[in-house]
Image (cartoon, rainbow, N blue to C red):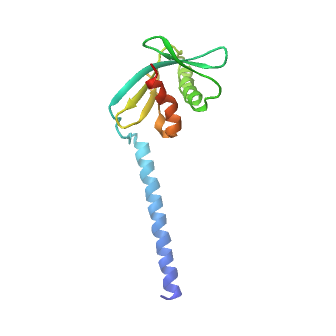
């Protein structure tokens, strides 16, 4: 192959890649702008627990089983993922002028996914998206008595 043919082939390859990238970006933009929700449906729930989380004076967070009114656990220290995920949900409640009275729903699904949702706002956190270690922080709350 001559150098002229190689340059010609390289230009075609670059042009083809550019067209593919622009087409992909336009396709994604079109779907996002259309408002169509592209999401896999949730698997059936295998276990659900209504939980409230209350800050305590010692800086810990009490995890309350809403149905029984009993304290399941007390989270001490940083507990970064738990506190961070709750902060995001609580911020949305505060933005809407809602209080902490209504419990959050922790749901285990048949496909192994775990979801923390807020019925008061409709917000949810798909916990498995943050890795198995972080999801386990919540998963253990389903097995506590």
Residue farthest to the top?
A: 69
Quarter of the image with the C terminus in it: top left
Q: Is residue 89 left or right of residue 37?
A: right
Q: Residue at x 51, y 40 (%)?
A: 131
Residue farthest to the right?
A: 58
Check the image and report above or below for 114 versus 95: below
Spot occupied by residue 114 in the image (x, y as percentages of width and height):
43, 33
Q: Residue at x 47, y 19 (%)?
A: 51
How many numbered marks are there?
0
Q: Is residue 143 left or right of residue 76?
A: left
Spot occupied by residue 8 in the image (x, y as percentages of width and height):
49, 80
Spot occupied by residue 9 in the image (x, y as percentages of width and height):
47, 78
Residue farthest to the bottom?
A: 2
Q: Residue at x 36, y 40 (%)?
A: 40
- Of residues 95 and 90, the one nearer the viewer is 90
Residue farthest to the front?
A: 145
Spot occupied by residue 28 in the image (x, y as percentages of width and height):
44, 50
- Of residues 42 and 68, the one nearer the viewer is 68
């Amino acid at each position: 192959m001559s150098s002229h043919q190689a340059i010609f082939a390289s230009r075609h390859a670059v042009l083809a890649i550019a067209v593919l990238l622009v087409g992909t970006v336009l396709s994604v933009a079109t779907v996002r702008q259309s408002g169509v929700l592209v999401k896999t449906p949730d698997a059936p729930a295998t276990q659900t627990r209504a939980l409230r989380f209350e800050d305590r004076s010692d800086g810990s967070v009490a995890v309350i089983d809403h149905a029984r009114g009993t304290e399941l656990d007390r989270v001490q220290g940083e507990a970064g993922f738990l506190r961070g995920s709750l902060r995001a949900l609580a911020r949305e409640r505060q933005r809407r002028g809602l209080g902490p009275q209504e419990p959050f729903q922790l749901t285990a699904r048949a496909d192994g996914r775990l979801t923390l949702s807020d019925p008061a706002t409709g917000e949810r956190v798909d916990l498995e998206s943050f890795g198995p270690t972080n999801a386990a922080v919540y998963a253990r709350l389903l097995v506590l008595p």
